[in-house]
Image (cartoon, grey):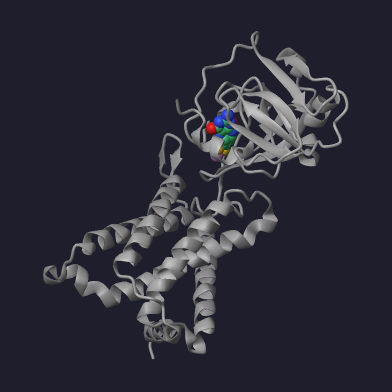
Amino acid sequence: MAVTDRFRTALDRLEPPPRAVDWSLFAFVVAEAVTGLVSFTVGVPEGWPLFWLHRALGLGIVALLGWKLARVRRRLTDPDLWQRSTALSVLTLVAALGAIGTGVAWVFGLDVRLSYWTLLSVHVGFGLALVPLVAAHAATRFRLPRRVDFERRRTAVRYFALLAAGGATYRLQQGVNDALDTAGADRRFTGSQPREGEGNGAFPITSWVADDPDPIDRDDYRLTVEGLVSDPVELTADELGAGHETEALLDCTSGWYTVQEWGGIRVGDLLDGAGDLDDDAAYVRFTSVTGYRWSLPIGEAENALLATHVGGERLSHGHGAPARLVAPDKRGFQWVKWVTRVEVRSEYDLGQWVVTLVSGFD
Ligand SMILES: Nc1nc2c(c(=O)[nH]1)N[C@H]1C(S)=C(S)[C@@H](COP(=O)(O)O)O[C@H]1N2
Ligand SMILES: [Mo]
């Protein structure tokens, strides 16, 4: 048998019953949205399985979509079979192909940039659009999953094989990328690509959604350190001098990373200057002049840096002057820029998840 025939036969063996294909597509898309979004919060290498799961599920969707299209092809190509719901089906297909296409192109290192939008941002857009579309599409042709569709002994094996094949394909791709030395070769476990060089000019200015404050006048700037401390203080920009230096890696969820030498004041030292901590102290919250904010558990916060310098240069406005948070092992969106308030708190700040999305909108 020719290799392609063998591959075909193997693929046929993996094909689940039609109704299982439909429900699996739905489940895989939801799982992709969850793994994709959660992966944005992972900054330490131990989190790698989540990224692999996302890739394997994505390739699983390619196979499932292939089976599905082979089955329903005529409903799309034959105008006599068009129904009202066909438009929704087509829209769902476009979003799915958009998410898959941008995902695969991203993996191969295609690097299209529209100001700070990268191919990865477009991938996220397609992916987020796909979830409600798939849900609505499933609702228009709703059929309960039957046990017989999933009951066969081979089902678990089949899904396992599907994901394993996805993982293997991704691994194979890494080899191809390395061999061809594409821009996809040199990436972190998060998928982010390097931005080389030192200082303000070496990496992009990125705001998560709409944050874009006016430059802060150094003479007017004050940083307050308050909350559960015995002696709250207010510091000027000059009082924040770059006494401490640390190398740290900034990994943005739009798909790039950079290693820089950051200079500033250790947050632990900053807190020492504000007297004693209350017994309830558990988190430190960093708030930007725009309202954007993030909290770190106090132990992590003490080792973080409030940076005034990068690569030996004073921070530029875009990168968060006069002071920005440098939080090693946290993703870029947690590195609050233009920090004006450091607060010791007893409670976790759930609101930060919403604020980072909406701050900057008037
Ligand atoms: N106040 C504020 N801080 C912010 C952001 C923002 O939008 N507002 N964006 C975050 C994101 S998404 C990243 S990746 C880093 C980027 O830092 P840079 O612009 O210095 O590259 O800043 C973070 N800090
Ligand atoms: Mo980011």
Ligand 2's quadrant is top right
The front one of 96 and 135 is: 135
- Residue drawn at x 75%, y 23% is 225
Quadrant in the picture for the N terminus: bottom left
Is 203 on the left-hand or right-hand side of 80? right
Question: Could you tell me if residue 46 is visible in this image?
Answer: yes
Is 141 on the left-hand or right-hand side of 159? left
Q: Position of residue 191 (x, y in %)?
A: 55, 52
- Residue drawn at x 51%, y 43% is 254
Farthest left residue in view? 80
Quadrant in the picture for the C terminus: top left
The front one of 310 and 307 is: 307
- Residue drawn at x 46%, y 83% is 150
Residue 128 drawn above or below residue 343: below
Is 57 on the left-hand or right-hand side of 302? left
Q: Position of residue 226 (x, y in %)?
A: 76, 24
